[in-house]
């Protein structure tokens, strides 16, 4: 039986392992941590309370993850929820459930149905010229190369977005969507992310949450299914090196253990991959892996607070901006979202900080009062409540940084080694998805490369993102034609 080793048990690694196990491969998934899940893992505190590395939303366009949930025959999600945005001035924006409202050609629904409390119409209208960039950025390799060297802030400035719209709408979206402020985000990733999550189709911003930790609700039953299909999921196995012969990986080294493989799938994050390369003499001989040193990841902080009394939180999920210049944060009413906390006498809130560099080294005793004071600004009733328990999870260098100029160093699924394939939310794919859905999709794509390479079994059926609406397709066709004509006259004179 052909042997495949998959490294890293997040969405990407589990996705690859599941498909390959179903195709009859002898698959071993090696995970450095003590349980699967990666950035989405959940576990219990010493007092038996559930915690996790941040709350994860599942947006309307996560078609492949929703298909997996059907395949697993599980029911992990809440219904579609509405969300709010707060600044230090109070409530700023409320989002409806977009799919419940009459569907308008994009982006009209997003502009008309989103309830801005303060932002003047003239600021909102200043977004209109940006539509050209959204049309021009079609997720092709050429489009990524055109926009990736530009920062999001420069892009918005160049297209005439007002300062207020930038600070009160676009930058908050970047801080929670790409985990970084505008001056640190690639304009290509920005356009891709905004289009995927918000602008491609009216319902795209609708979101559901797990009714408990993703680890318990999805990964536990998923790993059971993978094991039943013959896949081996091994925890506490940190991969350190590969044994390579010519252009073939022969084995994966994990401390003292060696796992032979006909094909290997890497499904680890950027930071972990950099560590593996730093340790691996064989990977360092190849520039594509050496160049990964140019990529970076971002610090995240996930806190969970138990309060002594019931506090009314108007919406279950909330994004906040303007509290710290370069940090975004979100808070979630877990009494409303998680079954476990429904009947809790007090309030349980999750508060996650993205691009949390300046918070990550604070002690729990220093962080918790900051969290409570921020919550109080949004929902004043938090002022008098007492924190009776808390959990602080520090995730240094945890999430992908789509920094300007990073695209040239990111890896596609295929590498210069014939039987080594890459997956994860930072791997180049033309699928168009982001975050968990992208990680899962790239895992399936890597599995398909293995299937084609080892010539056994069928490809995974990967659902494409929903097609562009007709007017967007039309505008993109015209734009590409004009661009093609321009290129045929002056091919490569200007910077892309
Ligand atoms: C606080 C927070 C909030 C987020 N919110 C959302 C959200 O709302 N919606 C959304 O879609 N996404 C969200 N994300 C992003 C999402 O978590 C990631 O996009 C996704 O989980 C990435 O999956 P992955 O499989 O690519 O990588 P990972 O989840 O990072 O998995 C990689 C795995 O590899 C393992 N590993 C590392 N090194 C080694 C080694 N040497 N040997 C063996 N194993 C190794 C790691 O332990 C890990 O289990 C959020 C992330 C965070 C941190």
Image: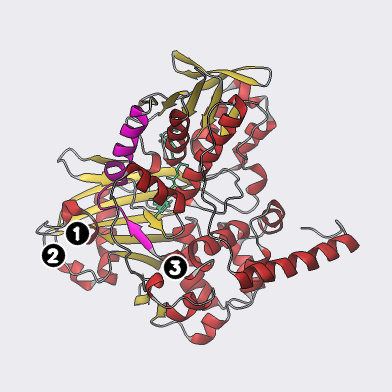
User: Element under label 3?
Assistant: helix
Q: Quadrant of residue 248?
A: top right
458 horizontally vs 53: left or right? right
Q: Which residue is mark 1?
A: 335
Query: Which is nearer the N-term, disc 3 or disc 1?
Result: 3
Mark in the foreground, 1 or 2: 1
Report whether residue 361 is seen.
Answer: no
Q: Is residue 6 above or below residue 444?
A: above
Between 424 and 469, the residue placed more toward the observer is 469
Check if mark 1's residue and mark 2's residue have beta carbons within 8 Å: yes
| CA neighbours of label 1 inside 10 A, class few (<14), some (14 to 19), many (20+) | many
**Which disc number belongs to residue 203?**
3
**Point 52% across, 78% down: residue:** 108
Q: x%, y% of residue 289?
A: 63, 32
Q: x%, y% of residue 56?
A: 36, 52
Quarter in which the C terminus is drawn:
bottom right
What segment is highlighted magenta in the picture?
Answer: 207-228
**Which disc number belongs to residue 310?**
2
């Amino acid at each position: 039986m052909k042997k495949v080793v998959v490294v890293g048990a997040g969405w990407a690694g589990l996705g690859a392992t599941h498909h390959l196990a179903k195709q009859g491969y002898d698959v071993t998934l090696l995970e450095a941590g003590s349980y699967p899940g990666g950035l989405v893992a959940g576990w219990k505190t010493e007092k038996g309370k559930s915690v996790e590395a941040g709350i994860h939303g599942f947006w309307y366009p996560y078609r492949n993850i929703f298909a997996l949930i059907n395949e697993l025959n599980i029911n992990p999600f809440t219904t579609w929820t509405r969300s709010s945005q707060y600044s230090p001035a109070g409530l700023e924006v409320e989002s409806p459930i977009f799919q419940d409202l009459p569907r308008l050609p994009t982006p009209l629904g997003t502009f008309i149905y989103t309830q801005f409390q303060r932002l003047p119409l003239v600021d909102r209208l200043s977004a209109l010229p940006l539509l050209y960039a959204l049309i021009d950025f079609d997720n092709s390799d050429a489009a990524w190369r055109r926009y990736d060297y530009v920062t999001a802030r420069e892009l918005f400035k160049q297209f005439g977005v007002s300062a207020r719209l930038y600070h009160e709408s676009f930058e908050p979206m970047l801080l929670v969507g790409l985990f970084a402020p505008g001056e640190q985000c690639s304009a290509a990733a920005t356009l891709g992310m905004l289009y995927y999550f918000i602008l491609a189709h009216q319902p795209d911003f609708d979101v559901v949450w797990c009714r408990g930790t993703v680890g318990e609700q999805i990964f536990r039953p998923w790993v059971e299914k993978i094991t039943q299909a013959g896949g081996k999921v091994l925890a506490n196995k940190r991969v350190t090196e590969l044994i390579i012969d010519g252009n073939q990986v022969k084995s994966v080294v994990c401390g003292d253990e060696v796992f032979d493989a006909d094909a290997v799938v890497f499904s680890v994050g950027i930071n972990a991959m950099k560590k593996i390369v730093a340790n691996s003499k064989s990977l360092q001989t190849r520039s594509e892996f050496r160049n990964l040193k140019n990529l970076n990841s971002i610090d995240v902080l996930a806190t969970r607070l138990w309060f002594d009394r019931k506090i009314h939180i108007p919406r279950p999920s909330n994004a906040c901006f303007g509290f710290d210049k370069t940090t975004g944060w979100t808070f979630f009413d877990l009494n409303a979202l998680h079954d476990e906390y429904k009947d809790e006498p007090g309030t349980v809130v999750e508060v996650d900080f993205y691009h949390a560099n300046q918070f990550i080294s604070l002690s729990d005793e220093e962080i918790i009062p900051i969290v409570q004071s921020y919550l109080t600004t949004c929902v004043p009733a938090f002022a008098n409540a007492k924190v009776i328990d808390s959990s602080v999870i520090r995730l240094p260098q945890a999430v992908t940084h789509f920094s300007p100029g990073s695209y040239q160093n990111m890896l596609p699924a295929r590498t210069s080694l014939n039987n080594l394939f890459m997956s994860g939310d930072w791997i180049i794919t033309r699928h168009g998805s982001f975050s968990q859905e992208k990680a899962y999709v790239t895992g399936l794509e890597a599995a398909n490369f293995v299937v084609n390479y080892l010539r056994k079994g069928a490809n995974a059926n990967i659902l494409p993102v929903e097609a562009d609406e007709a007017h967007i397709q039309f505008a993109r066709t015209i734009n590409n034609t004009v661009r093609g004509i321009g290129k045929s006259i002056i091919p490569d004179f200007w910077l892309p």
